[in-house]
Structures are given as C-alpha cells and as structure tokens.
Amino acid sequence: MVRASSRRPGLGTVLVGCLLLFAWSAAAGDLGTIRAGVLRFGTVSWELDVVKHHRLDAKEGFTLEVTAFASNDAANVAFLGDAVDVIVEDWLWVSRQRAEGVLVSFIPYSSNVGFVVARPDRGIRALPDLSGKTLGVAGGALDKSWLILQALALRDHGLDLAKAAKIVYGAPPLLSEKLKQGELDAALVYWHFGARLEAQGYPKVVGVAEAQEALGVPASTPQLGYIFKESWAKAAPERIAAFARASRAAKAIMKTSDAEWERLRPLTRAEDDATLRMLRDRYREGIVERWGDAERQAAAKLYAILAELGGEALVGKSKTLVDGTFWPLVRY
C-alpha cells in the first residue's frame, strides 16, 4: 500500500511565508493613520467620505480617520494641539502661522469661494445695483471674499460698497434665512450656501472667483487647502503625497459620477433634486486641475492684493506670502 505523503512544510518554508506576509502587510499599511479634522456639516466631509467608501486610503497605504468639529476655531485648536494631523484652511492663515514661527504647509483642496445672491424681486443684477441695498456679508469685515468684491466695485465702478450699501455681518445660515425673509436684499455667502439659494430661485449676481479673475488672478487659483505641520510631513514625506493622491482620486469620482452624488445625498442634506444638482455642479467648478509654479505665483499675487486691502489685521506682519506656505513635494 502506498501511503499519501504526510510531510509538513519545513520550518524554513514557514518562516519565509511569514516574512512575505509581514512584508505585504507592512507595504499595504506602512504609512499609518492620517487624522483629518472637518466641520460637522462642511463640504470636506463629502470628499473624505468618498475616500473611505472607495478605500482610496487603503489603496495608498494609509488609514484615514475623520473627526468632526462644530466650528473652524475648534478645528484649528485641535490641529495646533496635535489632536488631528490635517484640516482645511486658506493659505492666508498658513502664511500668517509661518510668519509667527508655526511651520504649517498647504496643498490644494478647492478653488471654490463664495458669491453674491439676491432676492429676485429687488432688481439686483450687478455690483452697482447693490448701492442703497441691504447686503449681508459672511465672515466679517476682513473676509477675503468681501475685500475682493470691494476692490472690484471701487476699481470698475468707483463704488465704495462698504459705504454705498447697508452692510450686515453674520453667519451664512443666518444670512440665508434673513434673505428668504426679505430682511436682506442680497447676501455674500460661502459657495454651498449660495448653491442652495440658487436652487430655490435666488439669482447669482457676481462670484468672488469672477471678481478675482477681473483683478488679474485666475478663477481656478485655489484658496482653500489641506494644511499640516511641516514636521509631521517631513517625518514621512510619502504620507502627504499619498493623501494628496487619494484626495484627487476622490475628486475624479465626484467629477464624473452622478451616481456617487446620489450616494452622498444624505451627507449633503440636499432638500431636493435641484439642490443636489446645484451642489454637485458648484463643487465640480472648484476642483483644482493643476498645481504648479504658475498656480503658486497666482496665489502669491492674490495674497499681495489682499495684504494691500486688509493690511496687518488680515495678514499679520508679512506683506508677502511666506516661503514654505505651499508644500513643495506635491505638484500636478
């Protein structure tokens, strides 16, 4: 009788197999965890949800962990206290931090900013029509979008908007409600609040991106980006490159797939199909396609314009964009 072989793998074979498995596991997740902080109902959470849903983080060798905060200030405090690794901010904030010795750096998230929407019954179709009207402004007197609009109104129409219109500062949700109630004639709000109002029939008057372009800076120049501490990025340079690739892969899905937006519908809190479509289309307008020397120079030009308009109260002591504001190892 011929017995079947009962030999077991030798110790060497087992060791080799274990080493190969260990090497594969390490390669698959050797970049560790990236902790991202987002606003609880902000648009960044949409993109990061796409990253998680499609396992784009795992494909790039890291694990994305998302923490939601109630406000920008809370997210900034968590970031500065090392409770999270990455948040979204503008390069004005990054440059100011660097000028004060906190070495933070930036890669693009979006070129979306905000725009003016008006009540359809107030005859407001262009910037000059805001004269004598009640205008709500999100973000306060030093909001960069408000400064850009004022600069364009003054240059092209000789109109000092801050004096010609009655200005009411407030949070975007409050301004949206005041506009609907008729207490405001128009409002300058962040893009996703504007998109919701557009879907409800409130016409867009002028976009900050259009005003920015009229001042000589391409509308596609990103103002918002993922920011992180330089020391964290330098400790593992491939980590931020992998995160940037995952972000861009998520944007590619969101740019081309309407079905993905249907999946995201609960997260967007779109009240109806028209709102979802408007949020989708406006989001896609802000996708940054290129990020190289030309785009960096355009951002530096916009910084100089804003520094002139807002002065030290806006940018601190640095009248020019501080070196290192843009992380040098991410380009596309």
Image (cartoon, rainbow, N blue to C red):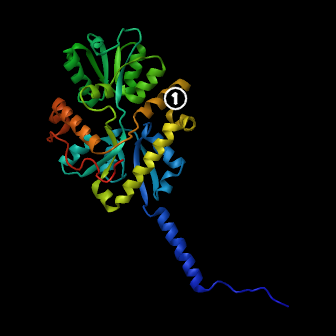
Looking at the rendered structure, the number of numbered marks drawn on it comes to 1
Residue 153 x/y as whole percent: 23, 19
- The residue positioned 47% from the left and 62% from the top of the image is 29
On screen, residue 286 above or below 180: below
Residue 188 x/y as whole percent: 33, 23
Residue 103 x/y as whole percent: 24, 52
* Residue that label 1 marks: 276
Task: Give the quarter of the figure containing the N terminus.
Answer: bottom right
The reply, left or right, for residue 101 in relation to residue 272 is: left
Asked if residue 272 shows in the view, the reply is no
Outermost residue toward the bottom in this view: 1
Q: Nearer the viewer, residue 121 or 219?
A: 219
The reply, left or right, for residue 297 in relation to residue 272 is: left
Outermost residue toward the front in this view: 294
Q: Nearer the viewer, residue 179 or 114?
A: 114
Q: Which amino acid type is marked by label 1?
A: Leu
- The residue positioned 26% from the left and 23% from the top of the image is 149
Indicate the secondary structure of the residue bearing disc 1. helix
The reply, left or right, for residue 136 in relation to residue 4 is: left
Q: Nearer the viewer, residue 40 or 128?
A: 128
Residue 67 x/y as whole percent: 43, 47
Q: Nearer the viewer, residue 143 or 324?
A: 324
On screen, residue 137 above or below 246: above
